[in-house]
Amino acid sequence: MLRREFVKTLGATGVALYASDLVGDLIAQSPKARVMESRFKGLSDLALSEARRLGCTYADIRFTRNVNDSVAVRDRIVTDSFGFGAGGMETSAGFGVRVIHSGVWGFASSPFVTEGDIKKITAQATEVAKASAVSKRFEVKLAPVEAYQDYWSVPVQQKPEDVSLDDKIAFLMKINEAALKVPGVIRVQSNMAFDYEWKYLATSEGSYLEQEIWRTSPGFTVTALKNGKAKSRTFSVAPKSAGYEVVLNAKMLENVERIANEAVEHCTAPPAGVGLKDLIMTPAHAMLTIHEIVAHPTELDRVVGYEANYAGTSFVKTSDVGKLMMGSKLFNVTCDRTLEGGMCTVGYDDDGVKSQRWPIIREGRLVDLQTNRETAHYIGQTASKGCTFATSWRNYPFLRMPNVHVEPGPPGSPTPEEIIADTRDGILIDGRGSYSIDQQRFNGQFGGDAFWEVKNGKKTRMLSDVTYNAITTDFWQNLDATSGKESWEMFGTTGDAKGQPVQINHPSHGSPWVRIRRIMVGAAFS
């Protein structure tokens, strides 16, 4: 009997197969967008009733299936996105049960989906909570949430799996061929990566939620060698929650020759030197600074010291909300899980909280933080902002940043060209580079991917060896120009790491062009 036929003969409570295959089969057997008729409804109710029988005051179960697919071409050789091996597809699936017993959390997970395993894992999560309660200092308090029964998915024009591997490789090979034609280019890597996530969440408070998310991230990097110096240049493509259309709309082929020539020019670019300069940051570069010294310090779990294992806590205090000046009057920052294309855009978080958009900085002042059901009351709020997520079925869900954007300037704001024309002695920075931040996210040092001198209102020549130092609040206080919405762009990262064991998040960070006055540059090279 074929596996699929075997599964069809069993009811939802009688299934016993390896989850990495079975979850996909169960998804195929369940009517899409009808969550109360899904095969996972019965499996979920089994865990929730078992948790109640064991005395848990709250429980949820989250089934997840992740498919990660990547391919790259390096110097005309097919490889994976990291430059090694043959690339390919990985699938992972299973479920996790989270409970509150004795006033504390318990969590356990399994790749096996059987009636017995669901009961066993629910009991293990309960035992974890009971054991943890021995050292509890206070009881978990959850902000209330409405019960939803809903299906949500990312809008996709073309699913990546509908494009053949041969076509993907042929596209990446064209980028290789075009770059290697430019004299001085010695290496090129073009790549594309696709992430599909399916999840079904059920809670003891009555929510049953199914979601499908596609994320696509293409790009290429060119390395040149000239006069004994090697430099690389990366074409920044904004990763998005969308399908293969992200690759088709990225204009990578149209920009290969320009990026390759800039890599060659970078080899002979003079050092920027050391001193105070005005920085003009493109959205492709600003995303990194926003991510590290705006988004991370405003995660409430870092603020209260819950998260310190991966890159520390935060200089922000809960008492700073409504008081702390984080930047100039032009500095407005918004968290947004609703914007189409955002890497963190979803329908609901892993607490079952509906996605939303809210300000965290207005006219330079800190006005709010990133919260979830567990932490909202720390700043006197009665509702969660919906920031709970787990990377996969095996991970405990915890507070993760949403898409965090710097707002464009109002109508009449200068264009990027006008910002350059208004700058006497500055450096234009594009793309992400190296970075180093202290354990409180207060003192950082950043590099970029490419740099140009701006003298007397004109963009002149490329520079090299550029870094800048940023005391977070002073840095944004020196913000004196933002371009308008016409030049606002959303970039982001596919590898935001946090927690121990480490989990990966995929936030987007939108920004206009911005200018920061009189910042120390070049100290790392002095």
Image: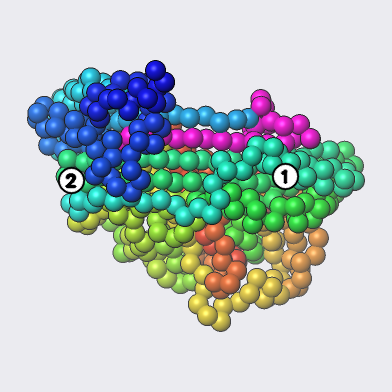
Q: Is residue 40 above or below residue 20?
A: below
Q: Is residue 336 magenta?
A: no
Residue beneath the point at 44% across and 60% down: 339
Relative to the observer, which residue lies in front, 12 or 300? 12
The mark total stands at 2
Q: CA distance from mark 2 to mark 1?
A: 47 Å
Q: Is residue 8 above or below residue 388?
A: above
Q: Which residue is mark 1?
A: 171
| x, y percent for residue 229 | 83, 40
Dot 1 falls on a residue whose secondary structure is: helix
The overriding secondary structure of the stretch rendered in magenta is: strand
137 with respect to 7 (left or right): left
Which badge, 2 or 1, comes first in the chain's sequence? Answer: 1
| x, y percent for residue 159 | 54, 46
Residue beneath the point at 33% across and 49% down: 33
Name the amino acid, label 2.
Answer: Gly
Dot 2 falls on a residue whose secondary structure is: loop
Q: Which residue is mark 2?
A: 206
Category of crowding for the residue at label 2, using alpha-carbon neighbours closer than 10 angstroms: few (below 14), some (14–19), many (at least 20) = few
Relative to the observer, which residue lies in front, 304 or 405? 405
Would residue 74 be seen by someone viewing this image from the given angle?
yes
Residue beneath the point at 40% across and 68% down: 362
Task: Give the magenta range.
Answer: 62-86
Q: Is residue 64 magenta?
A: yes
| x, y percent for residue 67 | 49, 35
404 with respect to 135 (left or right): right
Q: In the picture, which quadrant includes the N terminus? A: top left
Would residue 349 be seen by someone viewing this image from the given angle?
no
Relative to the observer, which residue lies in front, 159 or 154? 159
Category of crowding for the residue at label 1, using alpha-carbon neighbours closer than 10 angstroms: few (below 14), some (14–19), many (at least 20) = some
Name the amino acid, label 1.
Answer: Phe
